[in-house]
Amino acid sequence: MLKEFMTNTPISLNVTLQEFQKIFLQETTAFIQEKSGVNLSQNLETLTSAEIEKIVEIVADIQSKIRANIFIPNDYKNFIVDFIMQILFEIWKKSDSSEIFFIKIRQYFTPAQIASSLFNYVKNFENYKWATNFFAEHKQIFPNSNKKIRTIGIYYFRIFNGGIERFLSLIIPIYIQQGYRVVLFTDVSVPELEYSLPPPYGGMFERVTFSTPRNLTFERLQELATLIQKYSIDVFVSHMRTADFTPFVQSLFCKLSGIKFVVELHSSIKHLDFRLPSVAGYCLADAVVVISRTRREFLKNFDVRAYYIPNPIMIEKEGNFKGRDTKKFSNTILWVGRIDVNEKNIFAVVPIMKEVVAQIPNAKLKILGAADVPIIAEKLKELIKLNQLEKNIEFCGFHTDVSEFYKSADVMLNTSPHEGWSLVISESKFYELPLVFFKLPDNELTRDGKGSIAVLFNNYHAAAKAIVKILTDENFRIKLSAEARASLQPFLDYDIGAAWQRLFEDLENDIQTPQSNFENVQIQKVFLEEIFEIQEQNNNLRLQIQNLSKN
């Protein structure tokens, strides 16, 4: 079977996947033993450098010939190659000369081949722990990339309809102002919906749309390798941490390619993927940027090079806002964001407004934003109609310029269960708009409690009561309004460009960020390891039960 795959001839298989894996493993192992002279079942711990190189060379030859076979479909070809690489990684894992082994792997395989295949290998929890520990202990195996950073590559899947998307339109001009060249990588391009950069920055950066999807890891990394070389990227700043193109894969690929890797985590600590495997992946990055000091300290406990840098606050047409006219009043409540159930908890507006309207019949909620999934907006409209709130809740659609909506509103309502930063909250504070929201414990913008009323999550009655209080008590409303803008001022004064430049200079000079105290590190690390060892056992047990039920 193996030798057929290695020749450019048609392949015919009449076996199940399980049978194929068993036969292919046996044949590949036997082939490697025959060609290398190494007994793979006995003496892996004492492999010599020459034996290691011979094994890696043989596997590289097998992979090369299989990739050249035009009769194997690409998706099937990737599966076979990953299976072969897993055999190699198992030998690497069991060798006492693991550092030498990986150096040889680097010599025979491209960064795309290594990162994509290792991504599948470390889906096993034990392999993930072993690999991340190996890279943490052998940082010297990566190419030296302490060169001057001149070109920044930024990656997010799009640049429209969302807080991170809006953030990108604000941070790119800041990078340009600091003298950096910027290349933006996205998965989709919809020019008519995208946030535009303020003049003159719109034409001062380069834009690339990937032609391969994230789930085709090998093909995507191959394309990225070409683009990194084409645009002379020095540091890759990713805002994606999704399962099919994780920071672990991105970081490993970038470090093998000789460039720096930075990941920015936008979610709150409550929602963020702080599971141990992900935290271990963040350790591989050259820097992790967070927008909360709480998250920074948490990550530093795991030897992550974590930086706290708040998001930029640049309000469109802010020069036209001279302060809120307290005499203008219309019982208008504003909700701004992506119309979403899980992350924005949009359905909460209905029970809240039902109680508000019972006391203030002409109160009106304006919903500003669009839904990625149309059925969510449809279900929301059904719920509004069922509660007879059609006259009190208005859908205003998606707008890139939201200033007039903030100016004409009286109260801001935020229903999110978690917010990493929330551009919406910063905008409401800028426009001196009192805020009612569900408590966000690690959010920097709401930390001081000024200009707002926080209530427990999904306590609709408390939220409605707070809104009514603001709408009916003029002095209280004016007080919150003044506090809102004052509490935003420290963020307006923060020099974000200088903070990012310091981060990049730290990377150039390999300067480490101060770490948390030893005892705290050990306590949290042991605690989380115990939790996720149990979680892994539970997941395995669940899979076994599912397999039994199928049989």
Image (cartoon, helix red, strand yellow):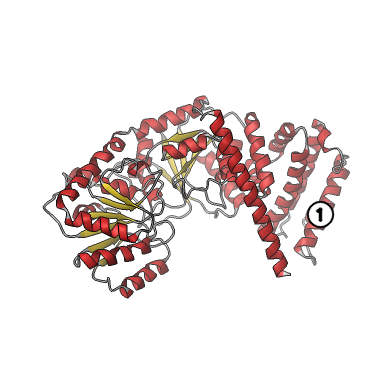
Residue closest to the eye, 476 or 302: 476
> Is 449 positioned to the left or the right of 57 in the image?
left
> In the image, what residue type sits under mark 1?
Leu
Please, is residue 149 above or below residue 476 in the view? above
> Is 88 positioned to the left or the right of 434 in the image?
right
| Residue that mark 1 sits on | 2
Residue closest to the eye, 101 or 111: 101
Residue at image point 42% right, 69% down = 375
Give the quadrant of residue 526: top right
> Is 527 positioned to the left or the right of 19 in the image?
left
User: Where does the image place residue 90, in percent across and percent down from the top left?
Assistant: 75, 44
User: Where does the image place residue 267, in percent across and percent down from the top left?
Assistant: 44, 47
Give the quadrant of residue 175: top left
User: Where does the image place residue 82, in percent across and percent down from the top left?
Assistant: 70, 51
Label 1 packing within 10 angstroms: few (<14), some (14-19), many (20+): some
Give the quadrant of residue 417: bottom left
Q: Can you say which quadrant of the picture contains the C terminus? A: bottom right
User: Where does the image place residue 173, in percent across and percent down from the top left?
Assistant: 35, 39
* Residue 409 shows in the view: no
Residue at image point 79% right, 53% down = 6
Q: Can you say which quadrant of the picture contains the N terminus? A: bottom right
Residue at image point 63% right, 39% down = 132
Residue closest to the eye, 550 or 164: 550
